[in-house]
Amino acid sequence: MGTSTLSRFQRGALAQLVSEGHHTYQDMADALGVAKSTISYELDRVKPYDPELAQ
């Protein structure tokens, strides 16, 4: 699996997982069906994470 782009829905789901605060990157990747590197890339792009800004 390589780094992929998240959909608007996936970004919203990622924001929810981040707000819950107890998920690892791997847990979030598994929940969204993407690579852990995608989660890492996405969360590094916008700090603090905001799905609307990331879109």
Image (spheres, rainbow, N blue to C red):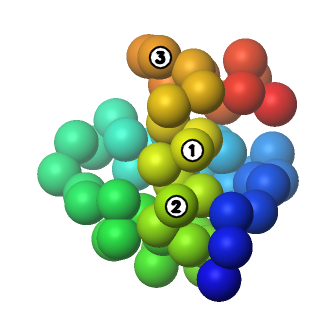
Q: Assess whether mark 2 and mark 1 are in contact (beta carbons under 8 angstroms).
A: yes
Q: CA distance from mark 1 to mark 2?
A: 6 Å
* SS at circle 2: helix
The residue under label 2 is 37
Q: CA distance from mark 3 to mark 2?
A: 17 Å
* SS at circle 3: loop
Q: What residue lies at 35% left-to-right and 70% top-to-bottom?
A: 26
Q: Nearer the viewer, residue 29 or 41?
A: 41
Q: Assess whether mark 3 and mark 1 are in contact (beta carbons under 8 angstroms).
A: no
Q: Provide residue 34's location: percent of width, then percent of height.
A: 61, 73
Q: Provide residue 21's location: percent of width, then percent of height.
A: 22, 42
Amino acid type at circle 1 is: Tyr
The residue under label 3 is 47
Say few, some or many: other residues with alpha carbon within 10 Å of mark 2 (under 14 / 14 to 19 / 20 or more).
some
Q: Nearer the viewer, residue 2 or 30?
A: 2
Q: What residue lies at 47% left-to-right and 48% top-to-bottom?
A: 40
* SS at circle 1: helix
Amino acid type at circle 3 is: Lys
Q: Provide residue 29's location: percent of width, then percent of height.
A: 48, 69
Q: Residue 41 has which mark?
A: 1
Q: Provide residue 55's location: percent of width, then percent of height.
A: 81, 31
Residue 25, image quadrant: bottom left
Work out which residue is located at the far front of the displayed protein and give it. 2
